[in-house]
């Protein structure tokens, strides 16, 4: 099947390219390279046909020629980024040239030249700068210059993605996921109201994304980057797999001049701002060092560039937790706020239980295993009231990164040029456990070592056919291997303390997770996150080609882009992970007639001392997990210069995504069928390997744009385009039999579920019948959660448009004002299919409970809509005469149903989940600058070394806060797995008070909804504030060495980002329990 999909793409490409060769009016601009065009006129303004135009890259002395057409127009597409000289020759006229023309990737630069009557032996060189206007394309976005990337202070290892905040419509980049998974410090942003997964990042035109867009794979060194092109709306038809931003990073290439740089950056915590709410800051030690060198191997033909970067990043970790005090550990609960009941008394349902005398458990009743586990805990080191954080953990998260790039460029013939790039990256992170090899609650139990071994390679070939046709082909391969191990990996710690059956092999080594999830304790008490360990590898193969033909005033381009991804992920994490989990609750030492004891943290800890868990669970690996799929893109694009002032872009793109298929022939995927309450296993019987998922063949995406130049200083642009939204995830790959959940719940609420002394039962897996269909009420599968794969759900589409007015201003500034908007339809969001659909019915409102007596979760997908409207303003000055200054302001409103690919919060009424996006900010102003101070700039000797060559650079941000979601307790709603929000009865206010007995919000305006009804507050309708940090960085220069005295947080004033302190549960979601 897969070969058939690939064959179709290649056949389509083979058909399109010959059509272009014979077309009467072919070809177009190159989106992953640059385009230079213009009009040659005489002194009277008439077009000059037949003029010979030569563009020469000044760094390599490589030239190309073209002839102006009947209208005097010329165009050069597929230009490598660089600085060019544009020269024109025509008999009867003097030679004319313009120097210093900068061409970046994914840009169209206009150079119009006027010929004067004279002899060819005479030459006129134009020195006036090209107006900084976007004159011949209708997309929105920004070019990030090398000067910005290397000189502006950037966090996260000087990651260029930090500058995405300067792009209008983009939110401030943030670092998602754990340190182990995202050790390369990939940053994410939401662009023009779209999910962060809707962005597409390329490196030298080759795919540079984790499969579903979760992460950017390779993060190049700032000193290796030539430029970054960010296109955010109505991009060329060549671009796809995106609805937000398309970012293409171009690495530097060698030139005829040998150039190099060596660098070292060091940073500490002296300039870090204190957190607004806690008033503390963490210790930091940071060192980054490296070098880059580029130059000729054979002048004018063969060039090299190479760089290396090392990072040593040590981050101080300060965490406070509540750990059991000494009297609790000995069984003395005389100071506890609740009564501890003896489970050895009374009945099996908990009735008739008697309290322990004096609320003290006899020493001979305490489990030896519990006693040994407690010996791993230190004594409290912070004075605090009972139940409050009484232990402070100080640790250091250590990260070591090595990265390198090599790039070769070769002008093989006058018609053929080639380039080859190899990039390598290896970050390794060690995050210490609170209690070393015994784990603990810091960072949710994510303690151990995470290693990421990644490399990316790309080969590009460009061939010109005469002066009017160009073929560009590129191929790439990206390998990504990410492994995370708990700190106790390789040790049979569970066996050693007496918990048998946990440590079966290397994958299950380490200490079992011990949880006490009642209020007061941070979990895991001991052990590690269920998410550890994991082993993930991903391979992406990418082949793409474009053919461009220029004839008359048309530039027509056709091409294809084929990507094949293979993703392997060994990780079991739902019900306790590979080492298993013992969960202790209060009920096992509580009384049914004493409600306080049923929720007491002291009772939960007493259950642990007596070895009476409420739940014993673990996850088992059954078969090799992983998926593979193909993405096949084809497009056609015509750039038509209707007149020297009017340019029209017309494009059509098609995207085809094959269904995910398991890496193994049988059992690689499975699908839960809610209609029959059964699990269908791929590859068995009549169940297809792709589960029967249908593919959409009508994913056509038209793109159009119009650009009109009123004069040399004024441009009006407008564009409209459609983008395809691919299926956002492949979570369904991790149903049974990829993994098997073993749950051993208690027979009743007050009875225990096994014991630590009894250990884990031998792993049990369900048998798969020959037809591959397993009833979901099979005992081993009855309580498992399942994902439901939509078999016939088409990809969503984003309709985007913009209209922009741009004007050249005095002092080399360019101003732009644009209306940018989009509407997305069919955006997939997770939906709990077995939630309570009728408030007031409890489990009886679950559709699968009434039919199959099933209460376990069944997650499916539902199409949703998003809406985005914005006013985007830019005022920019590209680097010239010592000053670079960009300014952007966005006034925006974004609405959706979920954040990223989150779940609908109100399955009973999906419309209640529609509201402001989690990332919505009404106002967002960002300014970036690099300014070389003019005094003593060229001074010599000691005076110049000390006082000359200083510059300041930085970013200033002022923005509105993000919305806050106000929620209420959902018990009275009686609709399982539905969120509840309060009624809003007045005007909301932020009081800003912090501390015990204080109110951050005025909660008097919220009230509890009537039983069995939803509140009237919308999602994300809470109050919000403002946030306005500023960054600046002075720099000193001594000859050719740079000495930086940088302050990454100078002027940083953390504002009330609409987010309450941690005591209110979460910075994004606030739980209010109002009185009725």
Image (cartoon, rainbow, N blue to C red):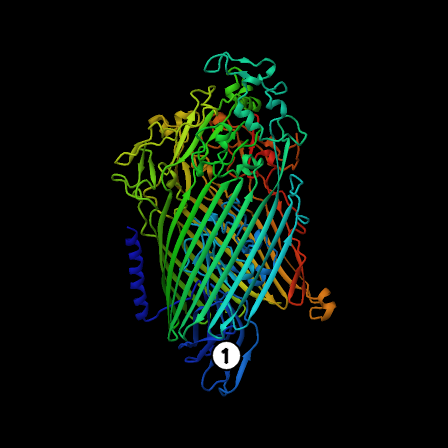
- Of 32 and 209, nearer the camera is 209
Q: Residue at x 55, y 56 (%)?
A: 160
- Of 821 and 224, nearer the camera is 224
- Of 614 and 127, nearer the camera is 614
Residue 194 makes an appearance in the image:
no
Q: Residue at x 61, y 53 (%)?
A: 287
Measured as percent of width and height from the top left, residue 1044 is found at 66, 59
Report whether 6 appears left or right of 555: left
- Label count reads 1
Residue farthest right in this picture: 943
Measured as percent of width and height from the top left, residue 743 is found at 41, 28
How many residues crowd mark 1 within 10 Å: few (<14), some (14–19), many (20+)?
some
Q: Secondary structure at mark 1?
A: strand
Mark 1 = which residue?
A: 114
Measured as percent of width and height from the top left, residue 150 is found at 58, 60
> Looking at the picture, does residue 863 appear above or below residue 891?
above
> Looking at the picture, does residue 176 appear above or below residue 735?
below
Quarter of the image holding residue 377?
top right
Measured as percent of width and height from the top left, residue 1057 is found at 60, 43
> Looking at the picture, does residue 1068 appear above or below residue 1?
above
Report whether 952 appears left or right of 674: right
Residue 430 makes an appearance in the image:
yes
Check the picture and name the quadrant holding the C terminus.
top right
Report whether 1005 appears left or right of 734: right
């Amino acid at each position: 099947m897969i070969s058939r999909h690939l064959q179709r793409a290649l056949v389509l490409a083979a058909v399109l390219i010959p059509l272009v060769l014979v077309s009467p009016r072919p070809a177009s601009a190159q989106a992953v390279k640059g385009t230079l065009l213009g009009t040659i006129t005489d002194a009277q303004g008439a077009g000059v046909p037949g003029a010979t135009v030569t563009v020469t890259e000044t760094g390599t002395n490589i030239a190309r020629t073209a002839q102006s057409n009947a209208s005097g127009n010329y165009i050069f597409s597929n230009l490598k980024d660089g600085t060019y000289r544009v020269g024109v020759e025509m008999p009867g006229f003097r030679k004319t040239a313009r120097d210093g023309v900068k061409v970046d990737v994914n840009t169209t630069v206009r150079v119009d030249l006027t010929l004067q009557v004279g002899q060819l032996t005479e030459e006129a060189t134009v020195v006036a700068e090209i107006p900084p206007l976007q004159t011949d394309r209708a997309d929105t976005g920004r070019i990030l210059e090398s000067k910005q990337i290397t000189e502006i202070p950037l966090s996260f290892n000087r990651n260029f993605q930090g500058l995405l905040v300067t792009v209008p419509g983009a939110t401030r980049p943030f670092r998602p996921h754990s340190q182990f998974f995202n050790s390369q410090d990939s940053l994410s942003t939401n662009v023009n109201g779209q999910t962060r997964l809707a962005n597409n990042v390329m490196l030298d035109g080759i795919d540079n994304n984790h499969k579903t867009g979760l992460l950017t794979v390779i993060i190049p060194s700032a000193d290796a980057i030539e430029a970054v092109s960010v296109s955010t709306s109505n991009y060329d038809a060549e671009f796809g797999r995106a609805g937000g931003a398309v970012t293409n990073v171009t690495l530097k290439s060698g030139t005829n001049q040998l150039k190099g740089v060596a660098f070292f950056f060091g940073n500490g915590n002296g300039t870090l701002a204190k957190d607004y709410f806690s008033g503390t800051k963490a210790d930091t030690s940071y060192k980054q060092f490296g070098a880059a060198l580029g130059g000729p191997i054979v002048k004018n033909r063969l060039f090299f560039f190479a760089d290396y970067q090392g990072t040593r990043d040590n981050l101080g970790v300060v965490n406070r937790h509540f750990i059991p005090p000494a009297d609790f550990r000995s069984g003395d609960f005389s100071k506890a706020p609740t009564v501890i009941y003896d489970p050895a008394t009374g009945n099996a349902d908990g009735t008739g239980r008697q309290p322990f005398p004096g609320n003290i458990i006899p020493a001979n009743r305490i489990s030896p295993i519990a006693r040994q586990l407690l010996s791993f805990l230190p004594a409290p080191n912070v004075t605090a009231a009972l139940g409050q954080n009484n232990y402070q953990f100080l640790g250091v998260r250590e990260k070591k990164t090595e990265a390198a790039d090599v790039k070769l460029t070769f002008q093989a013939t006058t018609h053929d040029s080639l380039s080859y790039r190899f990039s390598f990256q290896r970050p390794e992170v060690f995050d210490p456990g609170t209690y070393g090899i015994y784990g603990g609650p810091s960072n949710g139990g994510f303690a151990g070592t995470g290693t990421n071994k990644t490399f990316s390679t790309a080969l590009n070939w460009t061939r010109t056919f005469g002066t009017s046709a160009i073929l560009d082909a590129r191929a790439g391969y990206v390998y990504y291997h990410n492994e995370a191990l708990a700190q106790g990996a390789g040790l049979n710690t569970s066996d050693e303390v007496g918990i048998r059956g946990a440590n079966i092999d290397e994958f299950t080594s380490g200490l079992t997770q011990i949880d006490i999830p009642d209020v007061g304790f941070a979990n895991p008490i001991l052990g590690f996150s269920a998410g550890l360990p994991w082993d993930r590898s991903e391979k992406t193969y990418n082949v793409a080609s474009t053919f461009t033909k220029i004839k008359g005033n048309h530039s027509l381009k056709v091409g294809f882009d084929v990507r094949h991804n293979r993703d392997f992920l060994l990780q079991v994490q739902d019900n306790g992970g590979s080492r298993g989990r013992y969960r202790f609750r209060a009920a096992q030492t509580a009384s049914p007639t004493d409600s306080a004891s049923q929720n007491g943290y002291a009772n939960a800890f007493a259950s642990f001392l007596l070895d009476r868990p409420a739940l014993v669970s673990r996850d088992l690996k059954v078969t090799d997990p992983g998926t593979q799929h193909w993405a096949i893109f084809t497009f056609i694009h015509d750039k038509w210069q209707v007149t020297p002032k009017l340019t029209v872009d017309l494009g059509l793109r098609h995207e085809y995504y094959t269904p995910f298929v398991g890496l193994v022939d049988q059992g690689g995927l499975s699908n839960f069928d809610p209609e029959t309450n059964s699990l269908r296993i791929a590859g068995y019987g009549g169940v297809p390997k792709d589960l029967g998922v249908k593919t959409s063949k009508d994913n056509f995406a038209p793109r159009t744009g119009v650009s009109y130049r009123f004069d040399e200083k004024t441009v009006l642009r407008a564009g409209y385009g459609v983008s395809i939204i691919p299926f956002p995830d492949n979570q369904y790959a991790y149903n049974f039999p990829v993994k098997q959940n073993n749950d051993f719940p208690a027979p009743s609420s007050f009875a225990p579920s096994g014991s630590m002394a009894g250990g884990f039962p031998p792993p049990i897996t369900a048998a798969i019948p020959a037809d591959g269909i397993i009833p979901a009420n099979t005992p081993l599968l009855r309580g498992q959660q399942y994902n439901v794969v939509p078999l016939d759900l088409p990809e969503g589409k984003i309709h985007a448009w913009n209209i922009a007015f741009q004007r050249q201003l005095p002092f080399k500034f360019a101003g732009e004002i644009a209306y940018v908007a989009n509407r997305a339809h069919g955006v997939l969001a997770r939906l709990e299919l077995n939630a309570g659909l009728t408030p007031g019915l409890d489990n009886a409102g679950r559709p699968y409970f009434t039919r199959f007596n099933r209460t376990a979760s069944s997650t499916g997908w539902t199409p949703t809509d998003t809406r985005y409207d914005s006013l985007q303003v830019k005022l920019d000055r590209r680097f010239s005469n010592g000053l670079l200054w960009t300014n952007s302001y966005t006034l925006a409103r974004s609405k959706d149903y979920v954040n990223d690919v989150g779940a609908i919060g109100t399955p009973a009424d999906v419309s209640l989940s529609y509201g402001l996006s989690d990332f919505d900010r009404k106002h967002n102003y960002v300014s970036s600058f690099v300014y070389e101070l003019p005094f003593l700039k060229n001074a010599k000797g000691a005076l110049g070394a000390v006082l000359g060559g200083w510059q300041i650079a930085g970013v200033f941000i002022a923005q509105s806060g993000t919305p806050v979601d106000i929620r209420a307790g959902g018990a009275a709603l009686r609709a399982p797995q539905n969120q509840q929000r309060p009624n809003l009865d007045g005007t909301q206010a932020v009081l800003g008070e912090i501390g015990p007995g204080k109110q951050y919000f005025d909660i008097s305006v919220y009230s509890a909804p009537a039983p069995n009804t939803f509140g009237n507050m919308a999602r994300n309708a809470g109050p919000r504030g403002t946030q306005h940090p500023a960054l600046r960085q002075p720099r000193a220069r001594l000859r050719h060495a740079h000495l930086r005295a940088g302050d990454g947080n100078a002027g940083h004033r953390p504002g009330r980002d609409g987010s309450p302190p941690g005591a209110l549960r979460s910075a994004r979601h606030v739980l209010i329990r109002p009185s009725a």
